[in-house]
Amino acid sequence: MHAIRSIRARIRSDFARAFDRDVLGRPRLTLFLVALLVGISLWYAQDFALDASSDSLLLENDRDLRYYRGIRARYGNEAYLMLTYTAHNDMFAPETLADILVLRDELAAIERVDQVLTLLDVPLINSPRTSLAKLQKQVPTLLSPETDLDLARVELRESPLWSELIMSRDASTTALLVRFKVNELYEGLQTERDRIRERELTEDLSEEERNSLSILSSHIKELRSSQMEDQAADIAEIRSIMDRHRTLADLHLGGLPMIVTDMISFIQRDVIVFGSGILVFLIMMLIAVFHRPRWVVVSLLCSLVSIAFMVGYLGLVQWRVTVVSANFVALLLIFSLSLTVHLIVRYQELHAQSPGSGQGWLVYTTIRDKYRPCLYTVLTTMVGFGSLLFSGIRPVIDFGWMMVMGMLVVLVASFLVFPAFIMLFTPGEPQRRRDYTSRITGFFATLVERSRVMVLVSFGFIVVISIGGIMSLEVENRFIDYFKESTEIYQGMQVIDRKLGGTTPLDVILDADPSFFEEQQENVFASDAPDDEFGDLDDDFMDYFELEAAQPDDLGATSYWYNTFRLGVVERVHDYLESLPETGKVLSMATTIQTLQVLNHDETPGTFFLSILYKRLPADIKETLFYPYMSRDGNQVRLSVRVYETDQGLRRDELLKKIEHELVQVQGFHPDRVHITGMLVLYNNVLQSLFRSQTLTIVAVFVGILAMFLVLFGSLKLAFIALLPAMLAAGVVLGTMGWLGVPLDIMTITIAAISIGIGVDHSIHYVHRFRAEFAVDRDYMAAIRRCHGSIGRAIYYTSIIVISGFSILALSNFIPTIYFGLFTGIAMAVALIANLTLLPVLLRLTRAS
């Protein structure tokens, strides 16, 4: 042990000499090298990018994600834009239809738009009623000369397919569905990357596979960035087009591409507004607190150096910022200022105690006295953010890594820029002014001295109340509640939910029975098929039908699902899904068959008719009515469901379990044949992981910081005491969220771990100073009063800075960010009060025992 202490002492001595020689002795050179590094960082900062894609908000290694992408590739991408058009007058008035036609053509003219589907384009088979023979020659639409507008109005409102998809039931609102061209290269790279990632979960990858994964990820990032830029440009053009058509209708835009684009704009706004807003606000606070310009300038320099380096690094490695990590700039600014304030306050104390001392001694002694507590405060904050790595949620993990690296940069920048910059000035005269902060900290010291029991009872009561709130925490929340009512995301989702059958997509996939593929295929066409099934078909057409039916590749004969009996099973599932209060529009092969009954005299078609129908229908009808809901071999069906996002009683996890129970336990499907997928499932996976993530992050931060406190203080009892104020602050926040009914989400699960990581900073500084002061005269209350008059002031200043900084996050358009800022500010306020009251009371009880 003696040898280890000697080595540590020698290392510290060598480091101190190097610091004295290179930083304090050459301050201009130090600042020049820092400026050079900042310049290089700013060069790479031009590649700093944002990401709000759906991938950035999903679970790490979610198996459901790969299945979802496979289904999306087979049946079509659900990531389309829905433009709602609510006419001021009659929807079918000539001027309204003409306006929709022009709007459609303008949207279709955008280079990357693949298709625009409107009420003008959808097939109409009952306006007037048509036949299969006529349908083969021409597919009637609303623009066809023979179409009856009154019949079309009824068909679009009541059609099992188009009602609440293209037209609202009251015919006041119609939708224009805008699909973008699919980037097949991007989709293919994602599929291959997911395949390798899935293998990585069960076995070790070869060196070649690891290299492939790295290359694939890099290509995907580049393509995603380019794709998001193009998408943002397209949506801006679409909005410009919409603005030219608001005379005759109210228009809203919805859909995943628009949400992604708007969330990126929210991130950009948050980064700029929060960064600049907090900067201006904190400059005013620093001037009010320290008065001298040098303290304001050095504080800002330390912050800006840290931010510039981190932004440059993120640009260099192409590490994109998400909605979760969007406030990392503001956080770095807050934490850097907090650290610098401790250095400034200590410098001022030394200057007041030794007004004749030289600048070199003042700066060196400040750094010597503060490097150890500052190092541990940064390390504990890094542990707090590092605990987020256990969340399993990709954006939260990235946020944790960013802040771990950022805190290390803040520490280095502060201990280089602060001493080098201050060495350029002479000490001057110590500042003599009235200090109102001392009155506040003095009040807390009096409270500790005279009302120890009240302090303990009060915090005990708070703990009980907080536990009650924590027991009420939940994770279920509505995506629409993430946004303010003034945003187009909120307004668009609301209109789509109310008028057009729901917002959030959910797919139910039913596979064929495996035994079907093992049995010998039987001819499903009974020789005694009733003649009247084909009604008015002439003899020549019937002869052709019989020839077609005899072919061995007939879908009715070779597929599992495409026959009357099993389509009846699909219809039963369809009717169940449609009966659920949480669901809106449901589309499936049952919808297709119901739509095509018109061609069979409103009678349910038999298997023979279905087979012939499939062969003779035009390709564009198949693309609309068959391929989105049944695989081309007929051995898998998809039921597309849209869920009401605005439903106040929506409980996603309960809904999914209810559907699975119905299909498996009631309707008798084998579990392996039923797959529930879609964005609702992926989002629910994130929500359901939040409790586990919250527990893991809190345990991780508690264990990590407790271990560090054991090293720092050498006492398990003292380590627990120092950790209590921060744990209490985190508990109060979680309890408050529970009582107020604020659910956990991808932002708020970070609050507890971060609050503990930041809150213990004050505990470290206070305990470190208390031990030094208590050693002077062994007088508990004297030590407490000196601590409250010195380090207590620094704790108060930094707390006010942190609380004020986080409160500015309330300006965001993203509601979870607002909650993050407000609740973190509350946690810091509780930590401040606990560190200046509960902590010294517990320290005294420990000393007394």
Image (cartoon, grey):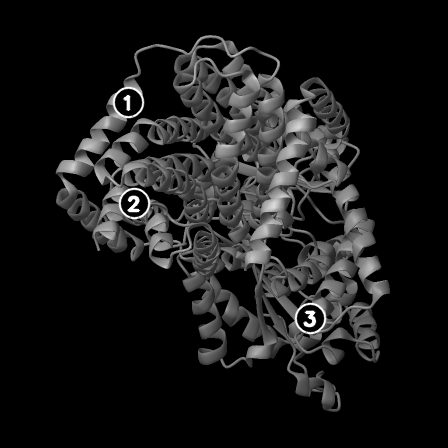
**Mark 2 or mark 1, which is nearer the start of the sequence?**
1
| Horizontal and vertical percent position of residue 105 | 73, 30
Say which of marks 3 and 2 sits in front: 2
Per the image, label 1 sits on a secondary structure element best described as helix
Write down the residue under mark 2. Answer: 736
**In percent of the image, x 41 and y 44: which residue is there?**
760
| Horizontal and vertical percent position of residue 223 | 78, 43
Looking at the picture, tell me which residue is in the foreground, 248 or 198.
Answer: 198
Q: Which mark is residue 438?
A: 1
Marks 3/2: CA–CA distance: 60 Å
**Amino acid on which disc 2 is placed:** Thr
Q: Which mark is residue 794?
A: none
**Mark 1 or mark 3, which is nearer the start of the sequence?**
1
Write down the residue under mark 3. Answer: 610
Q: Can residue 501 be seen in this snapshot? A: no
Marks 1/2: CA–CA distance: 30 Å
| Horizontal and vertical percent position of residue 39 | 75, 23
Say which of marks 3 and 1 sits in front: 1
Marks 3/1: CA–CA distance: 87 Å
The residue at the far right in this view is 208
Q: Which quadrant of the view contains residue 318?
A: top right
Q: Would residue 47 appear left or right of 581 to someone viewing this image?
A: right
Q: Would residue 446 appear left or right of 30 to someone viewing this image?
A: left
Q: Which quadrant of the view contains residue 603?
A: bottom right
Q: Residues within 10 Å of mark 3 (few under 14, many from 20)?
A: some
**Mark 2 or mark 3, which is nearer the start of the sequence?**
3
Q: Is residue 740 above or below residue 474?
A: above
Looking at the picture, tell me which residue is in the foreground, 663 or 19.
Answer: 19
**Amino acid on which disc 3 is placed:** Leu
